[in-house]
Structure formats: structure tokens, C-alpha cells
Image (cartoon, rainbow, N blue to C red):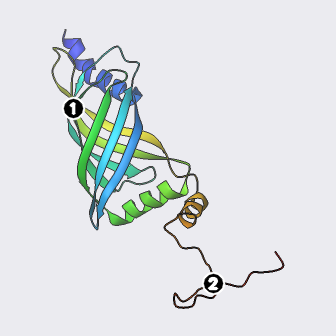
Amino acid sequence: MHSVYVGYPRLAQREVNKSVLNITSMSLSDPAPDSFTLELESVLSTTSKYHPELAAFNGSLHLNDSDTAFAYLDIPKVKAENGTESHVNQRVQIADMAEFTRYTMTVLGTEQFAIYLKGRGGLQQGGLPKTTVNYNKEITMKGKSSRRDIIRSIFHSPLIHHATPHHDKTDQTPPKQDSTA
């Protein structure tokens, strides 16, 4: 039985590494200069025959080419089974404004991008002792298709007044029609 305890932490880490976290919905709202409200829905995909309890932990969010976190969030406790859904709804402090700005530009400027969820938390499988695993999960997300599409949707919005000849409200003379059209 002693050999099970020796290999258990490595096995636990390997199974965590093999799992995939799929973001099904993400919303940033109520922005402030240093924070926002994050609502996040995710689904865990795993082929593991083990289904441990993953303890809640404090996670950091990073762009794929950076060790600097742009935000920290509390990840809730979950049972690690294929299809397990998780919901996060919390106020998040921006950890680094330059990185958060890069994240925002990445979301707006790409069709698909990756962020990393990093952290360290407990894992409990049945009657085995609790062990600690490291999270360094790549999460692939869809961004906006392109800045051009965003700009096009902004300028075609009914909230934006399109460039038209200016008429003073007191001037009731209709604009001249272009006879070449």
C-alpha cells in the first residue's frame, strides 16, 4: 500500500494535466478603473477513471506568452468528472493593468486565443490522503473575429449618428438632392 502513496501525487498531477477546461460562457461587466465582475461558465473534459474532489483555489489568469497575471479569481471546489460544470460569478481585481490591456486587445483583435489558468490546490481521491496539484491549464477561447467587424458594428449601430450634412433645427429647408445619383 505504501507504493500507492508514493505514486499518487504524480498520478494526480498527470490526470489534472490531461484534463481540458472548456469555457462555454464568459462575461465581464460592471467595469471600474481597477476591477470588473466576471461571470464564467465552464465544463471539465476528462477521460480519467478517477473522479477526485478538487479543492477551491486562488487562480491567476495569464496571456500565453506572459508570466504576469492580469487577474486573480477564486476557483470553486468541484468533483472532477467528465462534463462537470462550474460557475464563477465574482468581483475581480485587475492585477496588472498593462497585461489586462493586452488581454483586452487580444480578445478584440483575434478570432481565437489562449489564456492560462495557473494555481495550486488540493486534490482528494476517495480514502487516499489529500495531495496538492499545480494548475497550468491552457484555455482556448474565441475572440472577436476582427477589429474591422467590431468597428463596422459600432458604426452601423443606431446609437451612432452617421455623417450627414448638418442642419440647424431652426432651418426647415430640406437638404438638396444630388441629381447625379
Q: Tell me where residue 101 appears, x and y as whole percent.
A: 41, 63
Mark 2 Cα shell of 10 Å, populated few (<14), some (14-19), many (≥20): few
Q: Tell me where residue 9 appears, x and y as whole percent.
A: 26, 24
Q: Secondary structure at mark 2?
A: loop
Residue that carries the numbered disc 1 in the rendered image: 77
Q: Nearer the viewer, residue 152 or 141?
A: 152
Is 156 displayed left or right of 70 in the figure?
A: right
Is 114 displayed left or right of 99 in the figure?
A: right
Q: Nearer the viewer, residue 80 or 134?
A: 80
Q: What quarter of the picture does the N terminus occupy?
A: top left
Look at 37% across and 18% down and name the residue there. Answer: 48
Work out whether 49 lies above or below 40.
Answer: above
Residue that carries the numbered disc 2 in the rendered image: 165
Count of marks overlaid on the render: 2
Look at 63% across and 88% down and name the residue there. Answer: 173
Q: Secondary structure at mark 1?
A: loop
Work out whether 17 lies above or below 47.
Answer: below
| Foreground disc of the pair 2, 1 | 2
Q: Residue furthest top?
A: 1
Q: What quarter of the picture does the C terminus occupy?
A: bottom right
Label 2 is placed on what type of residue? Pro
Q: Residue furthest right?
A: 180
